[in-house]
Amino acid sequence: MSDAFWIAVVVLLGCTQALQVSLLGAMNRARGPAEAAYVSIIGTLAALSFALAIRAMLGSRPALPAPFDQPAAMAAMTVASGAVLAMALRGIPPGYAVTGMLAVPYLLAASYLAPKIGVGLFVAALITGQLGGGVVIDQFGAFGAATRQIDAVRILGVGVLLVGVVLVRGFR
């Protein structure tokens, strides 16, 4: 695959990170910042445990030390982290569990793509996506975020970041 494809993937991941930030802000208003982060991290653990459990059950064991390389151990981690997540979500909308799940594609992409396309290019594309997604979220005031209209200056800011991505990639 070409750099352009992977850059587009990372920009889209950046947009999901803007969504995650907005959801964390909404959860903060309901619970507090540390509590929002806690729910998000438990959601990440549950989602990654689930992905590794499925992979292990399909015959590709995780490259983790025993007992975490075993399908049953990963399944137990999935159930345990899912139960903790369900308890932590009591009293707030269960959709907030998505905050942690949105971190999973980012973490997987960072570990796979950053070495492939370069850390600088990965970060430049991610930040561009975050800003682009954030500008759109601000336009609508999604999840209680402050409303700030998209205007030419904000569009120019995102465009300049896109130019920065091209410059960080270089002309090869």
Image: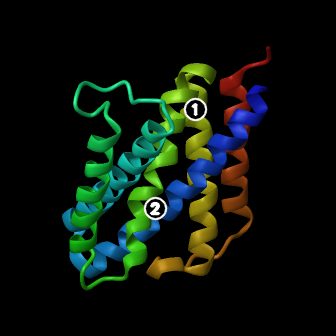
Give me the disc on residue 10.
none
Could you tell me residue 42's position as x and y percent?
A: 28, 57
Image quarter hosting the N terminus? top right
Looking at the picture, which amino acid does disc 1 mark?
Phe
Residue at 41% of width from left, 63% of height from top? 99
Looking at the picture, which amino acid does disc 2 mark?
Gln
Give me the disc on residue 20.
2
Residue 124 in the image: above or below residue 143: above
In the rendered structure, which disc, 2 or 1, sits on the residue that comes first in sequence?
2
Residue 32, located in which quarter of the rendered image?
bottom left
Q: Is residue 122 left or right of residue 162?
A: left
Image quarter hosting the C terminus? top right
Could you tell me residue 9's position as x and y percent?
A: 67, 42
Residue 110 in the image: above or below residue 145: above
Q: Is residue 96 left or right of residue 151?
A: left
Q: Is residue 66 left or right of residue 106?
A: left
SS class of the residue under badge 1? helix
Residue 161, located in which quarter of the rendered image?
top right
Residue 13 in the image: above or below residue 60: below
Q: Is residue 64 left or right of residue 15?
A: left
Residue denoted by label 1: 122
Residue at 76% of width from left, 35% of height from top? 5
Asked whether the residues under the numbered discs 2 and 1 touch, taking CB atoms below 8 Å apart as contact, a structural biologist would say no
**Can I make out residue 16 in this image?**
yes
Q: Residue furthest top?
A: 172
Residue at 71% of width from left, 69% of height from top? 151
Could you tell me residue 55's position as x and y percent?
A: 48, 39
Residue at 51% of width from left, 38% of height from top? 58
